[in-house]
Amino acid sequence: MKSLLARGNELSSSSEQLKILTDVSERKSLPLFETKLEESGMAPFLPTRIEILQVNVGKLCNQTCKHCHVDAGPDRKEIMSQETMRQCLDVLAASEIPVLDLTGGAPEMNPNFRWFVEEAAGLGRKVMVRCNLTILLAGEKFRDLPEFFAANRVEVVSSLPYFQKRRTDAQRGEGVFDKSVEALRRLNSVGYGIPGSGLVLNLVYNPGGAFLPGGQSTLEGDFKKELKRQFGVDFNSLFTITNMPISRFLEYLIESGNLEEYMEKLVSSYNPAAAAGVMCRNTLSVGWDGSLYDCDFNQMLDLPVTGNVRMIGDFHLASLERRKIRLHQHCYGCTAGSGSSCGGAIA
């Protein structure tokens, strides 16, 4: 494990992260993810159809969360240009892709964020925004975001590690829980999460350590009960997402000495039913510079899509729906237990 610990400060390199996962798998005799798919009768691994265009509009964020696979933060300079956003809109206009899923960083910090949302909504597309909640309290510039979201019927998906202050702040930073609760109240005040409003507010749960998330339905019940009882907060659904062994969470696994055990846990928990429904099969991920990826995790590991269509400006639906999805050992994270996707548990 010393050799892994020595690598802990080199994780800015995506190739180094992939090598670490390969080395651990070889040392522990863990099967390749492709082998598991072959045994499940799912090789080659191909898309179903593209139903979601997930766009990372930049890595700039007002937070620095310990589990963030994007490695986002206040010092990041990567920001999607309006020209690249326009190319994404052209793709939506020329296709029947029904959903635009905006992520970051804090996507709201992109200077063209509101224009992008309004244009997509104007095309009749469902717009989802992965909001970290605290951005709603980050200054006057962002204060009216709940009203803006409501006016454009945006579906809000927000991370909240737990319904208790201690666990949330330990993962996302001091004071984040109190700010998140205030932000949720503001969203509730314009109708989000309120039955009959049509304004959807979903929460995301990531485990606070090297273990898989608990049952999604049970956790959702606990969250709804406690957030309502303690803070008067309502929301629609809770999504449970497995922490991926990449970026900051990989660094945590190395520093805590949990990497090998965590990888063994992911592999032993492989679920073919979850593998059949992973997000890379119906989602196309767009990087801040317009590069195309099978999923948000492959984007952070610099694993672009296969084939000749690599940029959003060259989008060709038929070619992309015939591509072979790129795989590596981190893919076990999406297929362990009940599975994990941007929409929560799968199986």
Image (cartoon, rainbow, N blue to C red):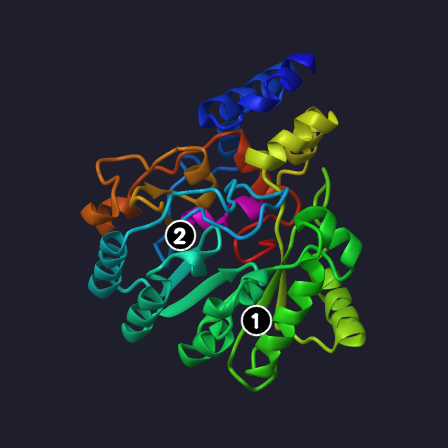
Find residue 283 and name its label.
Answer: 2
Q: Residues within 10 Å of mark 1 (few under 14, many from 20)?
A: many
Q: Is residue 329 above or below residue 148?
A: above
Instruction: Tell me which numbered mark, 2 or 1, is placed earlier along the sequence.
Output: 1
Q: Amino acid type of disc 2?
A: Thr
Tell me if residue 275 is in the magenta stretch: yes
Q: Amino acid type of disc 1?
A: Leu
**Placement of the N terminus among the 4 image quadrants:** top right
Q: Is residue 102 above or below residue 208?
A: below
Chief secondary structure of the magenta portion: helix
When asked about the image quadrant of residue 248, the answer is: top right
What percent of the width, then of the height, locates residue 289? Answer: 30, 44
Residue at the (79%, 69%) spot, across then down: 226
> Which element carries disc 1, helix, strand or loop?
strand
Q: Residues within 10 Å of mark 2 (few under 14, many from 20)?
A: many
- Left or right relative to 253: residue 43: left
Answer yes or no: is residue 214 visible. Answer: no
Q: Which residues are magenta?
A: 272-282
In contact (CB < 8 Å): disc 2 and disc 1: no
Q: List the residue tagged with mark 1.
A: 201
What percent of the width, then of the height, locates residue 142? Answer: 48, 68
Q: Is residue 84 above or below residue 163?
A: above
Residue at the (55%, 83%) spot, across then down: 190
Residues at marks 2 and 1, CA–CA distance in whole angstroms: 21 Å
Tell me if residue 183 is in the magenta stretch: no
Find residue 90 and name its label.
Answer: none
When asked about the image quadrant of residue 269, the answer is: top right
Residue at the (64%, 12%) spot, across then down: 3
Q: Is residue 17 above or below residue 149?
A: above
